[in-house]
Amino acid sequence: MKHVDYALEGNVAVLAFANPPVNSLGFALRRDLVEGLERAIADPAAKAIVLIGAKGTFSAGADIKEFVTGEIARAPSLWHMITAIEMSPKPVVAAIEGLALGGGLELALACHFRVAHKDAKVGLPEVKLGLLPGAGGTQRLPRIIGVEGALNVMLGGTPLPIALFAKSPLFDRVADADLRAAAVAFASEAAAKGELPLIRNIRIREPNIEALCQFARNTARTAFAKYPAPLAIVECVYAAATKKFDDGMAEEAKQFRALVEGPESAALRHIFFGERAANRIADVPDDTPLRDIRSVAVIGGGMMGTGIAICCLNAGLPTHLLEVSQDALDRGVARVRENYEGQVKKGKMKPDKAAERVALLKPTLSYDDIGGDDIVIEAVFEDMGVKEQVFRKLDQVMKPGAILATNTSMLDINHIAAFTRRPADVIGTHFFSPAQVMKLLEVVRGAKTAKDVLATTMKLAKALKKTAVVSGVCDGFIGNRMIEQYSRQAMFLLEEGASVQQVDAAVEKFGFMMGPFRMSDLAGNDIGAHIRKRRYVETPSVIYSKVADKLCDLGRFGQKTSAGWYDYKPGDRTAYPSSVVDELVAAHRASIGVKTRKIDDREIVDRLVYALVNEGAAILEEGIAQRASDIDMVYLMGYGFPIYRGGPMLYADTVGLYAVVQRMRQFAANPHGDPAAWKPSPLLARLAAAGGTFNANTGGAA
Ligand code: 3H9
């Protein structure tokens, strides 16, 4: 029994199980646990049995990778194991410390008794993976803590302190210190009493069951409209309260199977592993020594600089905010303060906490003040000349070993690094606006960036609560390089006959937070114009619609000018259709002599999404992104791609790459726009021909 240590303590058999790092209940552990249980049942010296997780934690539940490999059903399955416990003629006690989540808690619920350490946390987080507790959790939890409490635990999915369950019989004893000793003592007493209580035998008496479940159904349908798991959980709990235990279990099994095979759960599991995989960098070992980050300097007190400073303050890091004029500095500081005042007003932060964070902010006008900081993040205007001035200065003032980060969204990091005598210390940190809200951070690795600088920046990103994705150097990095292809298609669609509103509505119906035109109005249409102007000079062969330039010629830069692709009213972010834009588009179409046609929503979505996919494939092949799931994380965390679709690359896998390429061929036959854009990138073409996918599987990104 590799995963289970069997020991007899007095008349109690203790099965200490281990499957690092989180004791997930994979096949090998299940097999050993069942073997240990059988041994204890057969052991005449053992009168009771304790199940305890080795190394301070119980279990994080089923092994999520097994949902893809199919091992989840391999006997002994979790269901077999639970049945074996319930049939045990000797009392089985679950001893819980650390975490008991998902299948881990379900295992404990099948035991006759539960003893928990006072600091333990328990939960049923399956809903976050698009699943429901499928090992009896939906049937046993309402029996022991009541319907309402169980619904809250399962629909919320968060690990909860055991103190929250003090009023229910969920835990038979709480241990202050030595859990193992407490559980053994309890098990010995239970053996003496000879009782074998099982939660399955409890009858739910909930007079308000109909109303409670109807309320929960309505909430599930509105708050989680795109996700089937919450509603399925409610149905299972309803079955628990209205049917016999075994019939409720059958309902749970049916609903679980449907969820595990559905695209939403596949997407959420892909994200679970994708977020973790993004931290792994092929040539940077986990034990790479890190540089100490105890203080930060942020250069630039604009929207971006202050957002970055807030992230650092939230992580408890003393942060210099440097500006060139007192006015600009005052505005920056006011912005930081306003952010915290807003948090306090909304009740999201206690006033003393906010004050503590603001106290860490050190405004300054002098580079001399920041020389001793461990990392400096530059967030000044996106212009190589301005960056040059800043980096030459940083090279003079920063202490040796300080990390020099630039928040550029598109400029060449290698070029910026060359302004210093220490290119190995230079790295890109591309935050997304508003930086204190958006989860994504693209960490851009220059040709000379040192491995420890990269590893330290990734660790800092974690402290800042960001999902960091490493990108190589190219124009636009991962996210903006792809979005350019998407935007190009949006403009061609406009020329061909779609309206601004139709394109946005189609994409939003697909699930994007915002369509391309609303997004551009939010980001500022002048930014795109600026990029295109550079492209017209650098890569004149790339074809762009000129309609967006014409919009900018009218000064319609978006929300900031109360006019863009839509009209806006002061202080109101609602996008109102604009007759000016309709006329502009009509005149533009006439000027290029295009014959418009009726375009259906499906074409709009396919063209925009497949433009992302094709560029993503090129980015993958060039090694700019390390893995397909990294690209998906960028789009999910930074560009509002629908979470339940798992990102553009997973979506393409789901559609099938062969079908994607077929569709691209149809688009290439359209002479308007840029037919060459639909030439499948070599990786996409190869995978489509071989029946392959971008993501090896969705059970765990490589
Ligand atoms: C379930 O139980 C279904 C049942 O109802 C029915 C079944 C029939 N499986 O997050 P971390 C890995 S569904 C496999 O970085 P932390 C994780 O990938 C399950 N692997 O650490 C990572 O690997 P790597 C319900 C898992 O300390 C490493 O462990 N349970 C699992 O920040 C460390 O993880 C859940 O949904 C797993 N279950 O957080 C709990 N869990 O190092 C999911 C973790 O190679 N897990 N790994 O990247 C979590 O929420 C967090 O991992 C946890 C630790 C809070 C436990």
Image (spheres, rainbow, N blue to C red):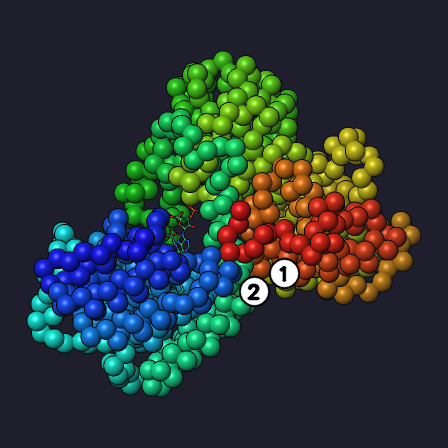
The image shows residue 541, relative to residue 415, as above or below, that is below
Taking 690 as reference, is 256 left or right?
A: left
Q: Is mark 1 within 8 Å of ligand 1?
A: no
Give the residue drawn at x 34%, y 36%: 316
Where disc 1 sits, the SS reads helix
Q: Residue 678 got which mark?
A: none
Where does label 2 land, which residue? 263
> Residue 646 location in percent, x, y?
56, 56
Give the residue drawn at x 88%, y 52%: 671
Outermost residue, right side: 593
Where disc 2 sits, the SS reads helix
Q: Residue 654 got which mark?
A: 1
Query: Is residue 582 among the parts visible in the rendering?
Result: no
> Residue 434 location in percent, x, y?
51, 43
The image shows residue 39, relative to residue 571, as above or below, that is below
Frontmost residue, 382 versus 558: 382
Query: Is residue 12 among the parts visible in the rendering?
Result: yes
Taking 149 as reference, is 215 left or right?
A: right
Please name the amino acid that badge 2 sits on.
Pro
Frontmost residue, 119 versus 25: 25
Give the quarter the ligand 1 occupies: bottom left
The image shows residue 699, relative to residue 290, as above or below, that is below
- Cβ atoms under marks 1 and 2 closer than 8 Å: yes
Please name the amino acid that badge 1 sits on.
Thr
Taking 590 as reference, is 418 left or right?
A: left
Taking 73 as reference, is 168 left or right?
A: left
> Residue 572 location in percent, x, y?
56, 54
